[in-house]
Image (cartoon, rainbow, N blue to C red):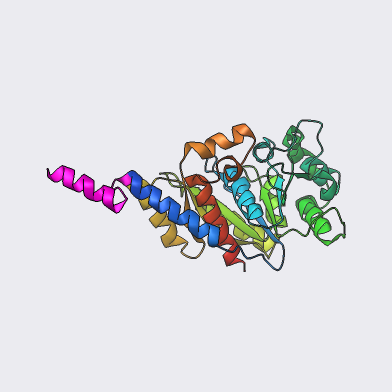
Amino acid sequence: MIADTKKKQRDEDGFDDSPIAANLRELTRRRKRLAEARFPLPDHTRVFTISNQKGGVGKTTSAVNLAAALAAAGANVLVIDLDPQGNASTALGVEHRGDTPGTYEAILDGAPLAELMQRCPDIETLWCVPATLDLAGAEIELVNVEHRDYRLRQAIARLLTEENEAVPSFHYVIIDCPPSLGLLTINAFVAAREVLIPIQCEYYALEGLSQLIGNLNRLSLELNPELRLTTILLTMFDSRTNLSQQVAAEVRRHFPTETLEATIPRTVRISEAPSYQQTIISYDPGSPGAVAYREAALEIAERGA
């Protein structure tokens, strides 16, 4: 009798108190907030490098999904794929077979980025300079090249200063680099002004982070005084586990101003999207993963306004 009364009351109130229903209500609230939000555009081009020397932390996933979220909100965004695996190129649905010109030609041959970038088929204001396997040999070939650390910086500067009706004024340039500190990654750090580090909410998350920050500080002193760690993004977050909560708390304690409030959940949909040559923003725009990346993108946009 009591159970029937409670069920009737829930039906009358129009909601269920189960955890699933609560999560759905919260997701609906977040979607509504994003739909009403205005993504401010920066008054200058913000150049990010997405980096973490530890693999499997969501580096490329974060690069392409943040880029897609910013572009879907009205920004002109260019992704430069510096990883020879070309995973960012795959996720953005651009051609990157061996004979496709891309970042290799920009860095080694000085080819203009304007001639190498391709428009993402899903989002009109998103472009990508693809990576091919040729980049795998670029580390060795760059050793004897003049100004080898500044090749990408020069290419980006040329793109942003040249007048070309076919090239938009970019609000964001996002560089996805390999999970190692070689000449390609150094080129990314020298070319960027801001560094975004994705950190996985798992046991070894902070391992190597101090070394990475030490490398950033040395590069800033020696090669790029404008370089700053501005953003830390917590990825693969599971609110149900104490471990994720503890890792998040530890990161926020050490980096209170750099760490975004938005966290990226561990979801199957985010992992599925690249197999369809899409970002989660295009593949399933209403999913928790897409909402999380859009929230992170909004924070990044608001911080730069």
Residue 172 percent location from the top left of the image: 69, 57
Identify the residue shown where x is 52% and y is 56%: 295
Residue 21 percent location from the top left of the image: 34, 46
Q: Which residues are magenta?
A: 1-19
Can residue 230 be seen at all in this image of the molecule? no
Left or right, 252 with respect to 83, comes to: left
Identify the residue shown where x is 44% and y is 56%: 29
Q: Residue furthest left?
A: 1
Please identify the quadrant where the N terminus is shown.
Answer: top left
12 in relation to 259, above or below:
above
In-front residue for pair 46/285: 285
Left or right, 150 with respect to 28, comes to: right
Residue 144 lies in quadrant: top right
Identify the residue shown where x is 68% and y is 43%: 122
As for residue 27 lying within the magenta part, the answer is: no
Can residue 204 be seen at all in this image of the molecule? yes
Please identify the quadrant where the C terminus is shown.
Answer: bottom right
In-front residue for pair 130/210: 130
Figure label count: 0
Identify the residue shown where x is 22% and y is 50%: 9
Left or right, 109 with respect to 301, comes to: right
In-front residue for pair 298/11: 11
Most frequent secondary structure within the magenta stretch: helix
Residue 154 percent location from the top left of the image: 81, 56
As for residue 6 lying within the magenta part, the answer is: yes
Residue 265 percent location from the top left of the image: 45, 46
In-front residue for pair 65/258: 65
